[in-house]
Image (cartoon, rainbow, N blue to C red):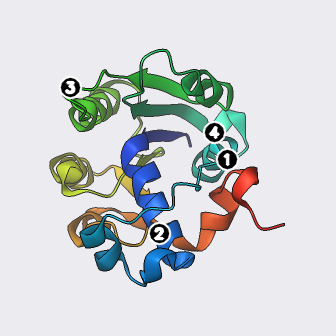
Amino acid sequence: MKIFTYVDNSNLFIEGRRLSAINKRIDGVCNIYEAINLKIFDNDWYMDYGRLHEFLCGTEKSEIGGTRLWGSPPPKDTFWDYVKSKGFDVQTYERSKGKEKKVDTAIAYQIGKDSGKIIDKENDIIVIAAGDKDYMPCIDDLTNDGFRVHVAFWGHAAREVQEAATKFINLDPHQDYLSAFWCRPQ
């Protein structure tokens, strides 16, 4: 058995900041809908990418089929070298007019390509770390074809995504573990 992991970094990171804002009651926000509507984030929250890699992929290198992470960094951002050092194969795209473009499509395309070439649907697991509905066609096609698709995301992932996955892994109870050391309680 091998695990093939695909991470939509912006989706995971931004929504992690929303959840952290709720947990810290920043500006009195107490639920995800308030945080979304009021655009409230915990800008001091950061992901620990080593722990994320371990959580999603396990620690047995022989069981890791591939671990990819996509995002749209600012130009010359050294953060992505750090993420690579934690075990991810990083794919980046430039922003267009300040917005991330191409990432969801690139992830779905890569999953489709890998599922046709290197993923064994009888034994392997596909892990998608994203929670928006843009991934529904990909998830539906894979599960209908007999692939095991686990979606790992915060609890407020789109209901359709949670229901379409073979297994949904709610990251909410693991946020402290997935938080970078500089924002963990002392």
Please give the residue where the numbered disc 3 appears in the rendered image.
Answer: 96
Q: What residue is shown at x 32% (from left), y 62% (from top)?
A: 165
Q: Does residue 166 appear to the left or right of 169 in the view shown?
A: left
**Which of pointers 4 and 3 lies earlier in the amino acid sequence?**
4
Mark 1 is on which residue type?
Answer: Glu
Of badges 1 and 3, nearer the viewer stands 3
| Residue 19, numbered label | 2
Please give the residue where the numbered disc 4 appears in the rendered image.
Answer: 63
**Which of pointers 1 and 3 lies earlier in the amino acid sequence?**
1
Seen from the viewer's position, the closer of residues 47 and 139 is: 47
Q: Position of residue 13 (x, y in %)?
A: 46, 50
Of badges 4 and 2, nearer the viewer stands 2
In contact (CB < 8 Å): disc 2 and disc 3 = no
The secondary structure type at the circle numbered 2 is helix
The secondary structure type at the circle numbered 1 is helix
**Which of pointers 4 and 2 lies earlier in the amino acid sequence?**
2
